[in-house]
Image (cartoon, grey):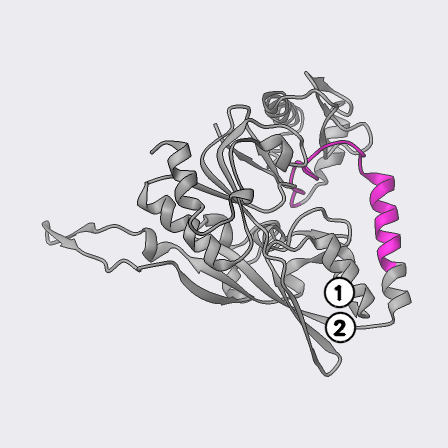
């Protein structure tokens, strides 16, 4: 189906002001690189999201769901199909004894939420006060910093379950006899709530990485504390972040921490700090970051990632893994 026709269908449930054709993804990623998305849509609520999913399914069009693009690298040829930016911004706070039960939409930025909680004397998000991602992205990758992780404060997460909605009739075999099992498909994606344990949190990983679920909102359990103490902790963490991390376009820490080694230290010991390919550079300030010096292409960054991984393996025998996700063609 032509892009313009898809856009026309989308406008039946979403404002045309939030639907873009051939949209440069460099405008929507912290790396400031990436080709165009065929269609880019900002959704404000669950009904709008369901509308996009329904149209995509009807027309057999691929969907890519993002937050604010702070942990992704989009390739130079862009992304085919529909890119959906989740902008659910609801925040609800309920007090239970000395605990604050905070229900927050997947599109709320961590920095904004941490500041809002500090104003209300709510502690527990200080570690995330400088992470430039959204709640949805933070849950998906179990984001963490300075001794804290999302798994430590999450009670439950509401999401869309796309398994049945996307499932087709499948073939099974019993005693070599083919039997077609017609699975009843859902009319629309099912909304489910997963407990902390059901989200299977690990270091920079969760059940959401298999892409069967779309995160809608998360419930957090935080504590009340003195406002000045909360602000002091946030200021100290942000001071450390500014001192240690580069001030250039990036997607945050490019590589995961090793089980028994510090990845940035390995990269530095291999003499790679400051190494450049095209406009991409291993940060001179923190070797765990690859940055865009201003004119990098996505391919420059990918080539540098591969060079760093290969060099570290050849010199140390360690296979380092990406923390960021690479999307597109």
Above/below status of 241 relative to 39:
below
> Nearest the camera: 154 or 165?
165
Measured as percent of width and height from the top left, residue 100 is found at 71, 74
Residue range corresponding to the magenta coloring? 233-259
Q: Nearer the viewer, residue 99 or 39?
A: 39
Q: Are marks 1 and 2 in contact (CB under 8 Å)?
A: yes
Instruction: Name the residue beneath numbered marker 2.
Output: 223
Query: Helix, strand, or loop for circle 1?
Result: loop
Q: Earlier in the sequence, mark 1 or mark 2?
A: 1
Circle 1 residues within 10 Å: few <14, some 14–19, many ≥20 = many
As drawn, 53 above or below 116:
above
Q: Quadrant of the N terminus?
A: top left
Give the side of residue 36 with respect to residue 71, left or right. left
Q: Is residue 119 magenta?
A: no
The residue located at (57%, 62%) in the rendering is 217
User: How far apart are labels 1 and 2 at the CA level?
Assistant: 6 Å
Label 2: few (<14), some or many (≥20) within 10 Å? some
Viewer-closest of 283 and 258: 283
- Which residue is identified by label 1? 124
């Amino acid at each position: 189906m032509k892009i313009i026709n898809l856009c026309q269908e989308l406008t039946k449930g979403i404002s045309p002001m939030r639907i873009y054709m051939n949209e440069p993804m460099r405008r929507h990623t912290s790396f400031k690189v990436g080709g165009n998305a065929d269609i880019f849509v900002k959704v404000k609520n669950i009904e709008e999201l369901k509308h996009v999913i329904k149209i995509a399914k009807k027309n057999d069009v691929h969907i890519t769901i993002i937050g604010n693009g702070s942990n992704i690298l989009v390739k130079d040829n862009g992304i085919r199909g529909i890119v959906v930016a989740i902008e659910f911004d609801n925040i609800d706070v309920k007090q239970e004894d000395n605990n604050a039960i905070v229900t927050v939409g997947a599109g709320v930025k961590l920095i904004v939420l941490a500041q809002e909680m500090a104003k209300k004397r709510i502690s527990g998000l200080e570690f995330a006060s400088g992470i430039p991602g959204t709640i949805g992205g933070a849950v998906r990758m179990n984001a963490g910093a300075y001794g804290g992780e999302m798994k430590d404060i999450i009670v439950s997460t509401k999401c869309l379950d796309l398994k049945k909605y996307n499932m087709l009739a499948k073939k099974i075999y019993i005693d070599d006899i083919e039997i077609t099992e017609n699975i009843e498909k859902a009319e629309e994606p099912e909304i489910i709530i997963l407990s902390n344990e059901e989200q299977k949190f690990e270091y920079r990983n969760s059940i959401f990485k298999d892409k069967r679920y779309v995160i809608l909102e998360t419930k957090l359990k935080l504590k009340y504390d003195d406002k000045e103490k909360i602000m002091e902790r946030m200021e100290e963490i942000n001071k450390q972040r500014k001192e240690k991390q580069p001030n250039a376009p990036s997607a945050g820490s490019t590589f995961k921490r090793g089980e028994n080694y510090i990845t940035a230290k390995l990269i530095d010991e291999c003499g790679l700090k400051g190494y450049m390919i095209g406009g991409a550079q291993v940060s001179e300030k923190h070797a765990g970051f690859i940055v865009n010096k201003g004119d990098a292409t996505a391919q420059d960054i990918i080539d540098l990632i591969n060079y760093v991984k290969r060099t570290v393996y050849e010199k140390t025998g360690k296979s380092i893994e990406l923390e960021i996700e690479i999307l597109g063609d």
